Amino acid sequence: MHHDEIIGKVQTLAQLPDRGSAERATHAVVSTLSERLPSGLARHVAAQLPPDLADDMRRAADAAMGTDSGTAGERFGLTVFAGRIADRAGTDEDTALRDAAAVLEVLDAALAPELTERIAGALPADIRELLPVERATESG
């Protein structure tokens, strides 16, 4: 899926007023998601994203990993997830959660099914609830 298509779908699903809001939301969710995922998985996701979103995913994964070559992502739940997205996107946490659900739904459609299954498996149950219903229940 191309960048413009991803942003357009996020804008529609999250009912955002303009493309700028959709861009901010998408970049905020991708960056925050990459901090939560194991670094190797984040890099696999990045390989299937358009270049600017892939850069967000890799940059955040590298920062979360630091100099450690381990593969574990940061451990945090829904509250921290929403707070980080809200900070990055300049919104409140309720809006961040709505935006995150839209972005995750678009990513679910854009990425290879086996990759989205691995993402679901790497997330805690509270964040996994933001995934499309069929994906959230598969990994539960």
Image (cartoon, rainbow, N blue to C red):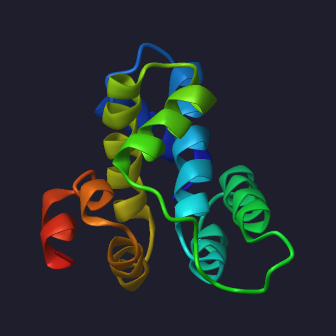
Task: State the image quarter where residue 137 is shown.
Answer: bottom left
Question: Residue at 73% across / 50% down in the picture?
Answer: 52
Q: Is residue 10 above or below residue 94?
A: below
Question: Residue at 41% across / 31% down in the picture?
Answer: 96
Please indicate whether residue 17 sits to the left or right of residue 40 in the image: left
Question: Residue at 64% across / 83% down in the picture?
Answer: 40
Task: State the image quarter where residue 112 is shown.
Answer: bottom left
Residue 121, given in percent of the width and then of the height, sits at 34, 79
Question: How many dots with numbers?
Answer: 0
Please indicate whether residue 27 sits to the left or right of residue 64 in the image: left
Q: Residue furthest top?
A: 17
- Of 135 and 15, nearer the camera is 135
Residue 63, given in percent of the width and then of the height, sits at 78, 61
Please indicate whether residue 136 sits to the left or right of residue 12 in the image: left
Please indicate whether residue 74 sits to the left or right of residue 108 in the image: right
In which quadrant of the rendered image does the C terminus lie?
bottom left
Residue 108, given in percent of the width and then of the height, sits at 35, 63
- Of 29 and 71, nearer the camera is 71
Q: Is residue 23 above or below residue 132?
A: above
Residue 49, given in percent of the width and then of the height, sits at 61, 63
Q: Is residue 102 above or below residue 108?
A: above
